[in-house]
Image (tube, rainbow, N blue to C red):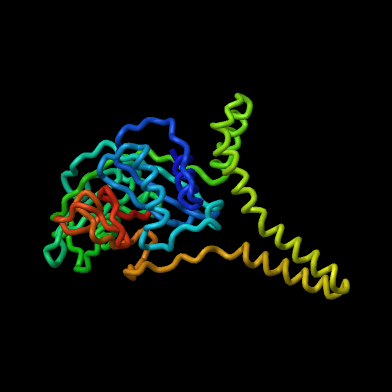
Amino acid sequence: MCYYCFDSLYCHLNNCEPAKPTFTNEAYPLFVTWSIGRDKHLRGCIGTFSPVNLHDGLHEYAITSATKDSRFSPVTKAEFYRLHCSVSLLTKFEEGKDYLDWQIGKHGVRIEFYNERGHKRNATYLPEVAQEQGWDHTQTIDSLLKKAGYRGLVTMEMRQSLKLMRYQSEKITVSYADYMASANRHSAAATNSGNSNCNINSSSRVNNIANHNSSSNNICNSLSNNVCNNLGNNICNNISQKINGCLVSMSSSPPKHHAAANNHHHHHPYHHHSRNISPTGASSSSSSSSAIVNNHHVRHNHFNHHE
């Protein structure tokens, strides 16, 4: 499933069509999360509580979470080879008795409440969030209230008044390296079986990505050779050192995560104030029937989530 998300994003960035998936097309609520680099910094996460068929749902949310998460600028081609993808399929929804009726590390939680202005708001954390952050039940609920945009004083009465839904998830995570290894295996298997039609997409993508990764080295070599042919050795060495230093600096600089247009204040990596989401999403007015992300309409009710 994660490989299909990689393929969907690759084709979105390069104007092509992904191969048809072969896994089940059952309907699930789901989230797609993109992270980047060795430290796996969040790069985008959007999902839905409405069950969607996996083929269409994963394709849609793989692209939406990478390009329309209002907290970040869209993922670029240059970032593609540093990405990690996670797919979470949500299951076993149960209504909690109160805000404490869930198990850390096992359950994701979704809360619904009325803010200080009387507007209904929703927010969720996937099952792994509280445990990863070292939060207890109360800290998690208080963080969710802030994520959903609640700006009032969080009191015991406020916590007891909210409605809580708990759920579980099946999560899969793969890296770009995993995706490329799978693409290479698929290409080799298709070649061995003589299925050229099946092989053409995967092999061309492998070659395109490999060519992209090596382009900076080709530019470096070309520049160095041209300079060396026209200048003396001393000048050549100086310029080559500067070129190499520049490339090292460029390759070591992490991508900039631009602030969202709505100026969300992230006091913690997991805090996010979602807006304009229907009751089946994160935080919104209860009358909304379709989600809006960065002024783009998406077919299903969905919302952002820090994974």
Q: Quadrant of residue 107?
A: top left
Looking at this rendering, what residue extends furthest in the front direction? 197
Question: At 73% across and 72% down in the image, what residue appears?
Answer: 242
Question: In the image shown, does 95 or 180 lie closer to the viewer?
Answer: 180
Compared to residue 51, the image places residue 146 above or below, namely below
Q: Position of residue 272 (x, y in %)?
A: 32, 61
x and y percentages locating residue 119 in the rendered image: 14, 62
Q: Within the image, what quadrant is residue 168 found in?
A: top left
- In front: 138, or 192? 192
Counting from the top left corner in percent of width and height, residue 144 is at 27, 57
Please give the name of the residue rendered at 62% of the width and 45% of the height, measured from the top-left corner. Answer: 207
Q: Looking at this view, is 130 or 213 the one in front? A: 213
| In-image side of 174 versus 268 (left or right) | right
The residue under the point 41% across, 31% down is 23
**Is 215 on the left-hand or right-hand side of 299?**
right
Q: Locate the N terminus and report the quarter of the image it occupies.
A: top left
Out of 157 and 7, give the one closest to the viewer. Answer: 7
